Amino acid sequence: MSPNPSLNPAVLALPFEPASPDLVVGRVVRMEGDRFVVAAGAAPVHARRAVGCLLVPEVGDRVLLAVRPEPWVLTVLERGGEGRARLEVDGDATLHTRGGGLRLAADTDVEVRAPGRVEVATREATVVAEHGRGHFGELGVVARVCDHVVERLTQRASRVYRFVRELEQLRAGRVDLRAEQTAQLSAEVTTVSARQVVKVDGEQVHIG
């Protein structure tokens, strides 16, 4: 079959005559810049990846080629190896489901990586995990109401500053406050009461 002479022969420089005038199947043999070298006949074809081909072809993959008016890799038909599959687009992108939800699921791990900012905006968020860890250089939390329900809470810090505008209340079965150097309690009115015994012990006790 002869190529259409109205088409640019430089663009149509194919080393073989395909069985179909438009589509052929080949296998990726190597990469040369942004071109995929595909074995699809007597000689390899240099083709670019089409915008709709989100799965990036790898060496050994079986791909579908569009050969007119110029070679393009349309899609990956079969993976040639066990390497990690990569979906890729150029520029900004949005994944949107119209009229439905979106679920990301994996049999092993899910990772979200970005060198810049990661933002999650939603009306309600729920995180359920058996174990959790967080590592931050700086962390700020602003909330109208914050409730913690834990069996054990351990905090370690070099300095702790707490500023309460109105009321701070602590209720516990036992309270043990210890300071290695100085402990100071200052207020306009201070009340210390006990049902049975109030004990003040020290080498010196100054009152007044």
Image: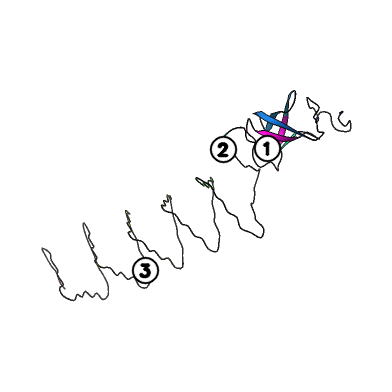
Helix, strand or loop at label 2? It is: loop
Mark linked to residue 164: 3
Please check the rendered image and state whether residue 53 is part of the magenta-colored stretch, yes or no.
Answer: yes
Q: Look at the image and give the residue range highlighted in magenta.
A: 46-65
Identify the image quadrant of the N terminus: top right
Mark seen at residue 77: 1
Is 196 located above or below residue 89 in the figure? Answer: below
Q: Which residue is mark 2?
A: 84
Please state the horizontal and vertical placement of residue 164, each as a whole percent of the image.
37, 68
Q: Quadrant of residue 178?
A: bottom left
Residue 85 vs residue 80, the one in the foreground: 80
Front residue of this view, candidates 166 and 95: 95
Image coords of residue 16 (percent x, y): 79, 25
Q: Which residue is situated farthest in the right direction here?
A: 6
Residue 152 position within the rendered picture, expressed as x and y whole percent measured from the top left: 32, 59
- First-in-chain label (2 vs 1): 1
Q: Is residue 190 above or below residue 79?
A: below
Identify the secondary structure beneath mark 3: loop
Name the image quarter holding residue 32: top right
Please state which of the two labelled residues, at mark 2 or mark 1, is closer to the viewer.
1
- Dot 1 surroundings within 10 Å: few (below 14), some, or many (20 or more)? some
C-beta proximity under 8 Å, tags 3 and 1: no
**Distance of label 3 from label 1 (alpha carbons):** 63 Å
Question: Which amino acid is tagged 2?
Answer: Arg
- Rounded to the nearest angstrom, the CA distance separating label 2 from label 1 is 16 Å
Query: Going by the image, does 119 lie left or right of 208?
Result: right
Q: Is residue 84 left or right of residue 201?
A: right
Q: Residues within 10 Å of mark 3 (few under 14, many from 20)?
A: few
Amino acid at the residue labelled 1: Leu
